Amino acid sequence: MTVTNAEPIVTRRHGLPNSWTLSSYLQNGGYSGLRKALTMAPEEITQEVLTSNLLGRGGAGFEAGRKWSMLRKAQPVYLVVNGDESEPATFKDHMLLENDPHQLIEGVVICAYAIGASQAFIYVRGEFALAQERVQAALNEAYQHGAAGHNIFGSGFTVDVVLHPGAGAYICGEETALIESLEGKRGFPRIKPPYFPAAIGLYGAPTVVNNVETLSNLPWIVEHGGAAFAALGVGRSTGTRIFSLSGHVNRPGNYEVEMAKTTFRDLVEHYGQGVRNGGQVKAFIPGGASSPWFGPDQLDMALDQDEVGKAGSMLGSGAVTIMDQTTCMVRAAWRITKFFNRESCGQCTPCREGSGWLEKVMRRIEEGAGREEDLELLLDVCDNIAPGLSWPPQQTTICVLGPSIPSSITSGIRMFRDEFLVHIKEGACPYG
Amino acid sequence: MRLNSDNVQRAKDLIALYPVPRSALIPVLHVAQEQNGWLTPESVEHVAELIGLTPAEVYGTASFYDMLFTEEVGTHLVSICTNIACLLNGGYELLEHAEEKLGVKPGVTTEDGAFTLEEVECIALCGQAPCLAVNWRFFGNVTNADFDKLVDDLRSGRLKDEVPPHGTLNRVRRDISAWAGGVPAAQQALKARASAPPPPPAQGDTTQ
């Protein structure tokens, strides 16, 4: 057991009465990071974030400071906040938006100041109605307080911060699709290169797209320094991070823990208080529905971005889903495949057509009408989407939704081939 | 029905927020959906006029998004999650119960127009699976008995403050009156962005 005593950073105000209001925020140290930031040069802030090695908390895990440093030198510059949290089993940004919107706004203004953005858009997933109300109310308070808008805290720095609602599409969590959506279009990812947002982003201007949790860390990093953040965690995996624990555990929920020092087992046993009904972990999904599965022998792996990557999966969005021994793995893989089929934007043939056929074949097996050759058929279709079925995956599509589709199917067949065969040979699910 | 005068003003205010009017399309469609419960053909035409698009372009965007309805929908949109975390915790059993209780399959509206049932993808409340949303107000750890009570409370109007009619999303209006000079000054201050070089054509953009 390696549960550390690191204090939570981004969730430290959760649970306080009316934690989403300005008065509560100010009583608990709010906006002091921004006040300090405005006394610094913008480059100094970027340097602190580089020192902190804050990795993006959305899914790809790219260094936030490097993302800022790659901006094409042109005006205007836009900041776009990715609050379109939709990766299955991920529910941390939902909580951050509802419980501490001022912390996000403070992070947004700090980032806007560091990168020289004149306008920032907070794109909140359409379904998050309460979050939108809380963020807008907090923005109104922040403008009133002088923490957003014109001449912030008398510093001469001005940035307009706009709440923008989505309308229900998983793909809009992909940053170039999010930009298309913010431009009022269908959420079609753009091809990269050339459409890296830092070079050609919103309205063709250089744009930083950062995740809600990523930006929520900035007030603390500015206040305490990048080195203090980097002192937490191990190697490249610095600071604390929220993990969304779900599935067959006694106490599912969001837990902010020190990166790389805590293990999956700590999450399950300490935070989640064990598998429900005293059961056993049969398999778990380490980083959202897009990530390949792990077995119980990998529970002692640290929550370390690089270590999980080397083991053939990813920490992704920080969503850890536990499946106990009663779980039908065919059904679990089928449901995830169905999700990708519904959410494929339809631009690229391997993803659009492949996800549909994979879902049909998976359903056939799950319903007891499968054929033995279906397993090879599934792997062949997966190979057409992500050639070689390697990790990290190769792709034949514009964005990474395509190569995310095979993860659950290839994991299921690799780890539980016998279970697939029982479905096929006996024409029924052994789990009922 | 076209947008009423109050909502036309809201639409204009939203359009003014963005450097490019089309960015306001989804926010304005939410306003239209709030007014009528769904995107009536007249409201789509009106939104197109206000933003400077054709109705086909508006439909092109609207039809991509799950929350925008181009057909009539019930007063209460009941969205039950069956994705992985809910699947593991009885999401499908809850959906089956909901089908029985409401007497409709997913995608169908009850005869009285009070409820539309839908099966949805993850709604990010996985710590409280199985979960659902009614008009995007969230309910977690839902048992069959909870569901029955929820339906009764919705029918009787006991939850009308917590769960506004379908289409109402964000009831808090933007207020930047603290900005010296108000909205016009804010727009003036942001005019600098107009001097930006013209953006290269975006891929997938059919309007250029």
Image (tube, coloured by chain):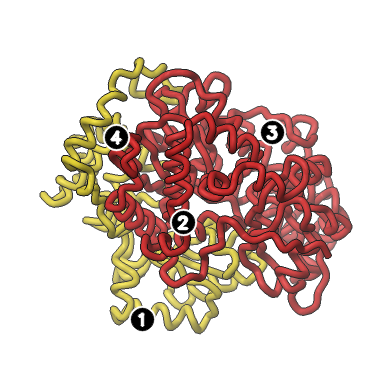
Q: Label 4 is placed on what type of residue?
A: Tyr
Q: CA distance from mark 2 to mark 1?
A: 28 Å
Closer to the observer: label 4 or label 1? 4
Picture coordinates of residue B127, whole percent (x, y):
60, 67
Q: What is the secondary structure assignment of the residue under circle 4? A: loop
- Kindly identify which residue carries mark 3: A385
Quick check: do tags 4 and 1 share a chain? yes
- Kindly identify which residue carries mark 1: B153
Asked whether, in this view, residue B19 is left or right of residue A426, the answer is: left
Q: Label 1 is placed on what type of residue?
A: Asp
Q: Label 2 is placed on what type of residue?
A: Leu
Q: Looking at the image, can residue B12 be seen?
A: no
Picture coordinates of residue A323, whole percent (x, y):
75, 64
Labelled pair 3, 2 in contact (Cβ < 8 Å):
no
Q: What is the secondary structure assignment of the residue under circle 3? A: helix
- Tag of residue A97: 2
The residue sitting at 47% across, 30% down in the picture is: A115
**Callout 1: residue from which chain?**
B
The residue sitting at 71% across, 68% down in the picture is: A271
Crowd class of label 1 (few under 14; some 14 to 19; many from 20; radius 10 Å): few
Pick out the residue farthest to the left. Answer: B5
Quick check: do tags 4 and 2 share a chain? no
Q: CA distance from mark 4 to mark 2?
A: 22 Å
Asked whether, in this view, residue A228 is left or right of residue A157, the answer is: right
**Callout 2: residue from which chain?**
A
Question: What color was chain B assigned in the picture?
Answer: yellow
Q: Nearer the viewer, residue A196 or B64?
A: A196
- Kindly identify which residue carries mark 4: B18
**Callout 3: residue from which chain?**
A
